[in-house]
Image (cartoon, helix red, strand yellow):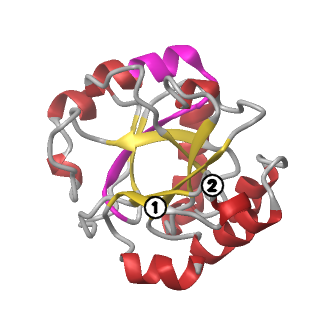
Amino acid sequence: MSTSVAEAFERCIAAGGLAVFPADTVYGLACDPDDRIAVQRLYLLKRRDPEKPSAVMFFDLQAALAAMPALGERTRAAMRRLLPGGATLLVPNPSRRFALASGSDPDTLGVRVPAVPQLEGVARPVLQSSANRAGDADPRRLEEVPELIRAAADLLIDGGELPGTPSTVVDLRRYEDEGAWSVIRAGAVAEEELASALS
């Protein structure tokens, strides 16, 4: 079951489609991060400001690390301690990879590696955002995803009821040189857990 779901997800993304899928926090909406038309479609569906960034999600930590060879070892070690899990990490992006996901700040990239058994083995990264209209509640069940988004998506994956708390967004852009970090959005990972991993 999991393998076929993962294969369908990869096929959908590779073909320029949009997929509604269960993360380890809330339901997300995903597309190819380098496909401008797919990204525009995702933002239009969500009514999300195109200047606002979205995270790039990897389904394997090693793939995430390999995609960002310019990251320093201290930051990479922090990623290994926090991921996979319910955190989105803002890291420096000097090579400006995945520019369509970075909004108005191409020097920063949001990176997410969830723990989603149904999608284990997915090799390609995706641009992802919560499967809701901008500013609305995060969906914890597939039925809570707005009907228009479900109708427009090319693939729907039902993962049952999810925890419903979005990822914690952690700024690690100054971590390499200064050891500094901050929470931009509280969420699934408690600040005490972050402090333990990053101190």
Eyeballing the image, is 95 above or below 89?
A: above
The residue that label 1 is drawn on is: 182
Q: Position of residue 77 (x, y in %)?
A: 73, 71
Q: Which mark is residue 147?
A: none
Q: Quadrant of the C terminus?
A: bottom right
Q: Which is nearer the eye, 174 or 75?
A: 174
Residue 1 shows up from this direction: no
x and y, in percent, of residue 168 in the image: 39, 62
- In terms of depth relative to the viewer, which is nearer, 147 or 75? 75
Q: Residue 177, can we see it? A: yes
Q: The residue tagged with tag 1: helix, strand or loop?
A: strand
Q: Amino acid at mark 2?
A: Arg
Residue 33 in the magenta stretch? The answer is yes
| Number of numbered discs | 2
The residue located at (77%, 46%) in the rendering is 67
Amino acid on which disc 1 is placed = Ser
Residue at the spot 31% in from the left edge and 57% down from the top edge: 26
- Residues at discs 2 and 1 in contact (Cβ within 8 Å): no
In the image, the segment drawn in magenta is 25-41
| Badge 2: residue crowd in 10 Å (few <14, some 14–19, many ≥20) | some
Q: Residue at x 23, y 63 (%)?
A: 164
How busy is the neighbourhood of tag 1: few (under 14 within 10 Å), some, or many (20 plus)? some
Residue 64 or residue 28, whichever sits in front: 64
For disc 2, the marked residue is: 174
Q: Residue at x 40, y 28 (%)?
A: 52
Marks 2 and 1, how far apart at CA:
9 Å
Asked whether, in this view, residue 19 is left or right of residue 114, the answer is left
Query: Which of pointers 2 and 1 lies earlier in the amino acid sequence?
Result: 2
- 162 inside magenta stretch: no
- SS class, disc 2: loop
